[in-house]
Amino acid sequence: MGVGMRARESVTCSRILGSLQIQASNNHCFNWQIMAFSQADAIFCTGQLKTSSVDLFQLERSSMLPLVFTSTPLGILFYILYGAWLFSELIGATLIPRLLYGARRGERRDRGSFLLNIVTLFLAISIDFVIAIKEGATLPAFLYYIGIILMAGGLVLRQWAIAVLGRFFTLTVKVQSDHTLVESGPYRLLRHPSYTGLLLVILGIPFALQTLPGVIVNLIIFGVAFGYRIYLEEKVLRSKLGERYIEYSKRTKRLIPYLL
């Protein structure tokens, strides 16, 4: 009888430990198979696996860790892409335009929009990380890949838009004396494709972090901050370019082709 009990305990422990090993290697949703075992079964494993109902809950929470916080190629890929985006903003949106075109003079009508955009942008990203760390993954793992695609696509689109706009691209709202309307490249469909690129990145980050609250927060913050920036830019461009810009506005959208 004692041998039979020992054998049962050994099998039970092996099944529980095996379940946890599979879970640890996959880093996906909590494997509810372990919950099929009674707490008494878990207690049999003392010395191999010390657990309780509280420990099981903690295991569940830790297993919901977003993929970006794991030491896997997927986690590393996110930070490489995130760093590439920051680098592109420093080099492609700041340093290269200054080296190619110098300090562009013109009437500045920014009204604090540049500072607002910078502060709210990184505030939103910080909130995303805090939520993801505290709440874990609230979105399925496959949305991580959607997030990565959005980030990569947004980075490329923004740098393309900046390159096409050339010397008329500025980080602040500014009108140059010889300002002309650019309608090539992404500007054939969109009036603010560089902001569309930013929107894709800002949405991609919380998707990659698998945090639904982060997606909502970023949409609200982007809508308020960049909505104000777009309003200022279009007001300035209408006053500078007149009827030509008004006609251009009628056949294009601000951020999303054919929709918005």
Image: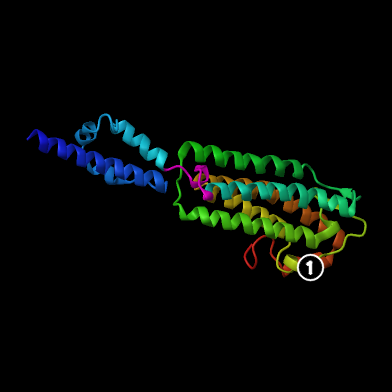
| Residue at position x 51%, y 43% in the image | 71
Q: Is residue 172 left or right of residue 135?
A: right
Farthest-out residue, left: 1
Is the N terminus in the top left, top right, bottom left or bottom right quadrant?
Answer: top left
Q: Work out whether 200 lies above or below 49.
A: below
Q: Is residue 255 left or right of residue 42?
A: right
User: Is 66 in the magenta?
Assistant: yes
Q: Is residue 65 left or right of residue 46?
A: right
How many residues crowd around disc 1 within 10 Å: few (fewer than 14), some, or many (20 or more)? Answer: some
Q: Which residue is mark 1?
A: 183
**Colour scheme in use:** rainbow
- Residue type (three-letter) at the residue carrying disc 1: Glu
Q: Residue 116's image quarter?
A: top right
Q: Work out whether 99 lies above or below 127.
A: below
Q: Residue 159's image quarter?
A: bottom right
Residue 163, x across and y down, in percent: 79, 60
| Residue at position x 64%, y 68% in the image | 258
Residue 247, x across and y down, in percent: 78, 69
Magenta part of the chain: 64-74
| Residue at position x 68%, y 59% in the image | 156
Q: Residue 237's image quarter?
A: bottom right
Residue 6, x across and y down, in percent: 15, 35
Q: Is residue 29 left or right of residue 9?
A: right
Nearer to me, 259 or 139: 139
| Whether residue 86 is visible | yes
SS of the residue under disc 1: loop
Is the C terminus in the top left, top right, bottom left or bottom right quadrant?
Answer: bottom right
Residue 38, x across and y down, in percent: 20, 38
